[in-house]
Amino acid sequence: MLERQVIIAARNLCKTYSAGNEQYHAVRNVDLDIHEGEFTVIMGNSGSGKSSLLYLLSGLDNVTAGEVYFRDRRIDQFGERELSDFRAKNIGYIYQSINLVPDLTIWDNVTLPGYIAGQKKEAIATRARELAHTMGIEGQLGRLPSQTSGGQQQRAAIARALINSPDVLFADEPTGSLNYDQGVAVLDLLSGMNKDGQTVVMVTHDIKAACRADRLIYIRDGKIGGILEFGKQGDMNTNDREALIFSFVSQKVRV
Amino acid sequence: MITAIWKLGKSYLVKNKVQNAFVALLVLLSALLVCTATIIVSNTGDRFDEMHMRTNGSHQILTFEKKLHDPEAVQHWWQSQQGVQTSDLMRYHTLSGIVHQGKDIPNLYMFMMETPKNTPSVDQLIVTEGKTGVEPAPGTIWIPTSMAYPAGISLGDEISIPVDGTKLELQVSAIVVDVPYGAPFSNTARVWMNHEDYETRIDGLDGGSNFLLGLRFDNYGDNLAYWHSFSSAMGTPFLESKMEFEEISSFYLIINQIVGFIMIFLGAVMLIIALLTIGFTISDGILANYRTIGVYKSLGMTSRATILPYLLQYGLLSAAAILPAFALSTVLAKMIIDLSASSLRTPSSGSAIQGLGAAVIVAIMVFVLVLLFVVVYARRARAVMPAQAIRYGMSEGDSKLLLSRSNAADSTGIRFGHLPVSAAIGLRNLLINRKGTVIMLILTMLASSVLTLGSVVLSSIGGIQGTAAQWGYDSANAAAMVVNKSAFPYDEFEQTLASDSRISGYGWQGNMTAIVQSGSVASDQQNSASAPASSLSLSILEGSYEELGFANLEGDHPVLRNEISIGVQVARNLNKQPGDTIDVYIAGQRVTMIVTGIYQAIANMSNSARITMEGALAVYPDFNNRDVAFINVFNPKEANAVVSDLNGRFKETASIVTQGTLLDSVYNQASAILVYPMSLMGLLFLLATFLIIYSTCRINIRLASKTYGIYKSIGMTSGRIRGAIALGIVALAFSGTIPGIVLGIFVLPVLLEMVLSGYGIVSLPVILNGGSIALAAIISVAAAFLGSWASSKVIRDTSPRILTIE
Ligand SMILES: Nc1ncnc2c1ncn2[C@@H]1O[C@H](COP(=O)(O)OP(=O)(O)O)[C@@H](O)[C@H]1O
Ligand SMILES: [Mg+2]
């Protein structure tokens, strides 16, 4: 396999929440490399710390201890301005709860990060139209999120995450609030973009979804419980991948 | 980035339309109050000063009615002085008893003036209506605005005055501003006549003509020095009447000062409330939008940029509020100024308003303050961490806060079962947001205190009949003012009074100018002229001050010939207390008198003193000045009959009115000027109460919407929930009105006294009217109730499902 560039790296990463007097260690001493062009999937039980880890890797939350690198820069030491800039330009984030701004139209939601990143208006519009086409939400652009379906909202959220062509796309259970067909469509989009070179880090519970990845990271109690490399889709037939992932995960769960 | 901020600011504006509109209205109201007050206060002196300058107004006006000086010699002496301008020596004759359109106008003394043939150098007249030439055409007169406006006399009207058993009928051909006699509340007016009319109809009347001389000093402060050399040159001090500049100017300013001062104070209070409300609204907005703000930050928005949309939102809102507020304030201020200085209004001065610059600065300050508050309160948005915000919709700190709030509601013992359900819900609603509750409490308190103050002021002025003595007047049942001293039959009048069995007693009062000096300083210093000296108006009463119903603030009335009671202004200037001695120069003679009491009097701004007739005669044996007779009757109900009988016989040379009529005319003018600004401020505060209670309740209801949704889902009617919330607010408002009433009765009048102390009133004679105070309280509680009721409409209009989800 070709030696690929590391784009996000975590070293000895920890996150501790304190609620009152109690402390909760949601992420414990995680070391992790994400490579450019890679489709990484993160699995684990509910409450195991997957979302927490994703927030730390994407600079949406501050770390308790350890280091997070974007290429060779430490994002955990970024100041406010650098951090904002990083969020605007280098990452895209898709939430299970979608989180479109309810008062803005789909179009405004999609284009907003473009304006935040200070892009030219024409460039933003061109890119937004292109993404709307890809996501199949051209008919919804003038509507408010509440006037569209969940699947359309999530596709708008993906368009929003991609508007600034981020280096890494994070997705936290992107299909969790969608029905089966909508979920498949979203996954198709993600794997399609990955084929075009987009780095994707996705949290999921769904083995079928995990099949689309190159690599699986299993999290247990905030620690990496195991890593499974199975290569690009197509290297192996889908049933075999599913079987492989299933046996890996069920083995991890049992331990 | 700009586009993004603009988009967000716009979305904030569109989102909570009602809330935004109310915030804007609140800013509008407070800006309106402070800007109006600023303009009024900056116009307080200006309008008068400008007119006094423009007309080359006099500082002192001498009237020669007692034939104690040769008027021409006096004028001659003044003309030869450097730094003093004199008017022509004008002939006049006083008349009263004017009838206009069949109606008597009581309490108005007219100086029927022979209009000088040359344009006057001092006290030039300014025409507001009609045409003037050098003098009025035969058969016509010019009357001052101060006479025309209150009496409703218009250009072209005929007035009729009884003289010598016939009627003098004259037509008004011009209405003029006559600065020295034009102040509000003045009961003297100069009526300008054609000189031939004067010659044929007036000069030959009993008593003949008197003379009037106006003096304008280049430096008014020097006047005492001039008078000093006048005394030396003439061998006698000036013994006739002299009207001082302070008297001329004071009443022009009084209403503006009162209104302006109260407005500034209340405007500042309202502004603070508005700012705090904006602060709370922002905090609430941030809380409500926490998740969205988290999303913005996750999209790479900086903390500073998260504040900017709020700045944009409130910047636009307050600009949209302040601009019309400013425009409105110029109109409003002009209305109030015109109302209080109506007699100075001329076609050209009417539009000129000073102080616009100051008002602009105030408006900008309000704007900046709003932005400052936004920055301070929006700073919490900076602390938003995207991950936590998105996950919980609030920061960890806030989730603890909410928890502690609902615990607080529990820990105060407000449990269902302990209290009726409605009471428990109403109280819990107040405990959700304690800062907001405190603001609501303060606001209802202020609103009711302002309304109470308004009702107290009006009932005090309205009840001036009962407190006349505390305003420095007598409390006799009737007064007979001698209009034409030389023709008035004093003996016949006294016989009539003595023989009327309905009359219980009477006393004469005369006035003259005296000079006072601090006794101790005068004796310490060799040159007494350099000791602090000032002139004052001295009242001399033949009869008992006690019986005629005068009052002191402290001490007693003068009874013995060496006793004197002094106005608070004099007491203050010379630092005198009852028991001290004071040197008084009466007709140039120095006497040392003992201060027996200190009183306040709105007339002459308490720069006056009272002595007995014996006291005056002891220094000045020729004193024979009987200006007014105060008359008491056994049965007050008969006062009117007595007055009309007396008028029947003495009308032509005296003006005889009951105390009631006299005070009514003062009351009518004062209340006409005060009612509008006071009720306006009351209204503004009611509106603010409504708005703030509305928006605070809205916030509370949003915070607890889940709870209300649950109540609704378990079968409580929305009417019952809303009723419970309103009940809590009414209880809150009610507990606010009680200290509010106390404030309005005892504290705010102190503010008024601060303004009025410059006018010689240090203790406001307050009359309380329980009914109107209760009404004030009820109105403010009602405003609060309406605010909460309107705000809880969402509970009715929203289904339990949505309430619980929100
Ligand atoms: N702000 C917080 N305070 C306390 N505990 C938290 C906080 N955020 C997350 N947690 C806890 O951290 C653990 C990991 O959460 P999360 O990363 O969301 O797990 P996952 O995404 O794998 O379900 C959970 O037990 C969760 O309750
Ligand atoms: Mg999760």
Image (cartoon, coloured by chain):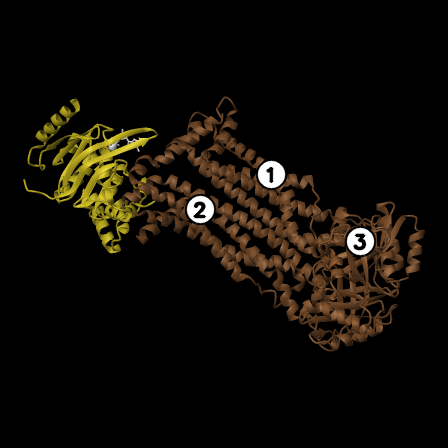
Chain colours: A yellow, B brown
Q: Quadrant of residue A185?
A: top left
**Furthest residue in direction left, as rendered:** A1
Name the residue: 35% across, 37% down: B395
Residue A78 in view of the camera? yes
Q: Around disc 3, counting alpha carbons within 10 Å, would you say few (fewer than 14), some (14 to 19), or many (20 or more)?
A: many
3D distance between C-alphas at marks 3 and 2: 66 Å
The chain holding disc 2 is B
The chain holding disc 1 is B
Give the percent coordinates (x, y) of residue A170.
21, 40
Element carrying mark 1: helix
3D distance between C-alphas at marks 3 and 1: 44 Å
Judge by depth and name the residue closer to the eye, B155 or B769.
B769
Q: Which residue is mark 1?
A: B739
Q: Which mark is residue A20?
A: none
Give the percent coordinates (x, y) of residue B429.
48, 32
Q: Which residue is mark 2?
A: B20
Q: Which residue is mark 3?
A: B594
Vertical position of residue B340 compared to residue A31: above or below: below
Residue type at tag 1: Pro
Residue type at tag 3: Ile
Name the residue: 68% across, 39% down: B771
Give the percent coordinates (x, y) of residue B101.
77, 60
Vertical position of residue B604 compared to residue A74: above or below: below
